[in-house]
Structures are given as structure tokens and as C-alpha cells.
Image: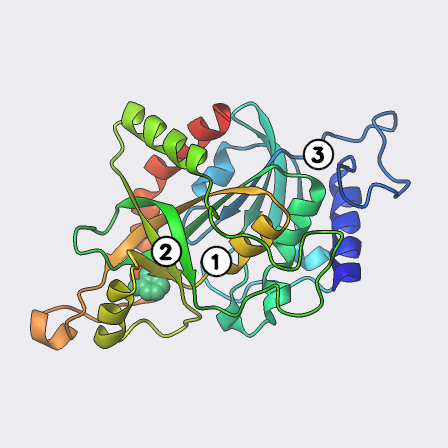
Amino acid sequence: MSEKIKNTTCFIRSRLNILPRRYFTDSSEGTAENGGRPAPEVGIVLGSGLGALAEMIDVISTLDYSEIPDFPTSTVAGHRGRFIYGRLGGKYVIAMEGRVHYYEGYPIDEVVLPVRAMCCLGIDTLIVSNAAGGLCPLFEAGDVMVIRDHINLIPNPLVGPNPEELGVRFPDMGEAYDRKLITLAHEVARAQGIVLREGVYVGSSGPSFETPAEVRYFRRIGGDAIGMSTTPEVIVARHQRVRVLGFSLITNVLSGVPARLCGGAELTHEEVIEAGKRAMPGLCALVREIITRL
Ligand code: HPA
């Protein structure tokens, strides 16, 4: 796998014409003299319905996932598949417009390959976003939650031989989400008049939504929001000692009561995408200002 991470990183780097930084810097391609561009400082994963942030990036170059050899491409509606390299908030950034999920059937090390590659391109900070169902009874559809911590119920992407050159065998997860960045997120949200919730994200494999009993269970074990992505990506980023900031967009609330008993309707993927679109502008403005202040 390590070889695949290296090959993928070098391919992306040469196609986006980015200078090597920190990892795999022995390659001959890319020097400032032959026009190579600075390595990105910030990586961004644009989750369901958060595509609008991509429109705020001053694009320098893009690369479709389908052009990268043996690279996973998403099968889910609402997920595009490409890297965008450019400037946002005065920083060089690389964004994943679309991600793949474990429920699509990819092995977990392929699910995290795009984030692995961004970390190997030299990012210091990873900003992840997702659509999630609200478990905390105080949350409403349209809320934005900064992730304080997570519970990973998707297979751990570090299982298997450890790529020693990337990180240690047993990485600490005591502060998977950077406390200083969370504080910054609250400061910016306050200044922008955005209500920012904070809580624990549960990463579940999906693709079925939760039963009422599961909703009650996930609440009891400490979850505030639940979704089908993010946690494996955060684990590999922390393995590579990249600091992480995460946001969940609460697209629907989970009551823990069967819909039939509380007059609720069936939950659909379309509803999740629509709610994501409505709450998008606030989150995009928030993330841009946070990047400016990094
Ligand atoms: N459950 C799991 N994942 C989700 C949900 C949900 O209710 N909403 C958006 N992603």
C-alpha cells in the first residue's frame, strides 16, 4: 500500500505541478526553477452538498480522479470526483471535490487514499466536512456542528502493515480534532453570527440509515451526530501528524422513535442533499475565514 500511496502522490504532484514537500522528496520532477508551484498548506474534504466552497477557491489547476491510475471514484449522486488546487483565504489549498465511502464497497485503504495523498503532498491542516444526522435532541436540521471527537465504527484504515515512513504503529488519538482550531472556529462563527454547535461524530459504515433502537444506542454511547464517512480519513491524517478540523452539517434529526409513532416521513438521500445545500453558504463563509486566520 505504501508503494501505491507514493505512486499516487507523485502522479498528482506532477499533474498539478506541485513542488515536493516532506514526503517522497527524492523525485526529480518539480523544482521552483521549472515552474513548480508551492505545496498546499491546507487540505479540504468537501462532503455531501458542500460543493459551494469549491467555487470560492481561486483555481490554479484541477485533476479528475478518473485520470489517476487505480484511484477510487465515487458512485454516489451528489459527489463529484476531482482535486482542486488553488488559493483560498490567502493560502495554497487542495480540495477533494467528492470522496468515496466504505459503503460503496472499496477496501478501507482505498477509501483513505485521497487523504493519504493530500497529507503526502505536504498539508499541515486538514479540514473535513460531512452531512450527518443529528443525535443530540437539541440539534435542528440546518445546524452546523464542529467535531470535538469521534467514535469510529468503520474499519480502522491503519490495520495491516504499518507504513513506518508515514507514522507510528500506535498513533495517539487523544486530541484527534485540534483544540486550538475548534476555538478558532467558535471565534469566527461568533463574529459571523453563525450558531456553531459542538459535539461527537459517530462514523458508521452505512449505507442503511439508523433504526430507532440504534439512534438511542448511539446517543447513549456519547454520539451527537452520525454519518457514513470522515473518521477513517481523520485517523490517517493524525497518523501523519496533520492537524484536523471537522464540521458536520446536520441535514436531518434522528428522534429514536419509529416514524409511524411521531408522524415522521421516511428519510431519503435526496432530503440529505437538499438540506446540505441550504446550510452550505454559512459553512463555506466560516471555513474560508478560518483558513484566512490559520
Ligand atoms: N444517518 C447516517 N448518515 C447520515 C444521516 C443519518 O441520519 N444523515 C446524513 N448522513
Disc 1 target residue: 231
The amino acid type, in three-letter code, at marker 3 is Ala
Residues 12 and 25: in front is: 25
Most foreground residue, 145 or 29:
145
Residue 24 placement (x, y as % from top left): 81, 46
- Dot 3 falls on a residue whose secondary structure is loop
The quarter of the picture showing ligand 1 = bottom left
User: Left or right: where does residue 126 sit relative to residue 5?
Assistant: left
Location of residue 2 with respect to 147 vertically, above or below:
below
Left-right relation of 106 to 31: left
Name the N-terminal-most of marks 1 and 3.
3
On residue 39, the disc is 3
Residue 99 image label: none
Q: Measured along the vertical axis of the image, is residue 231 above or below residue 16?
A: below
Mark 1 within 8 Å of ligand 1, using the beta carbon = no
Residue 52 picture quarter: top left
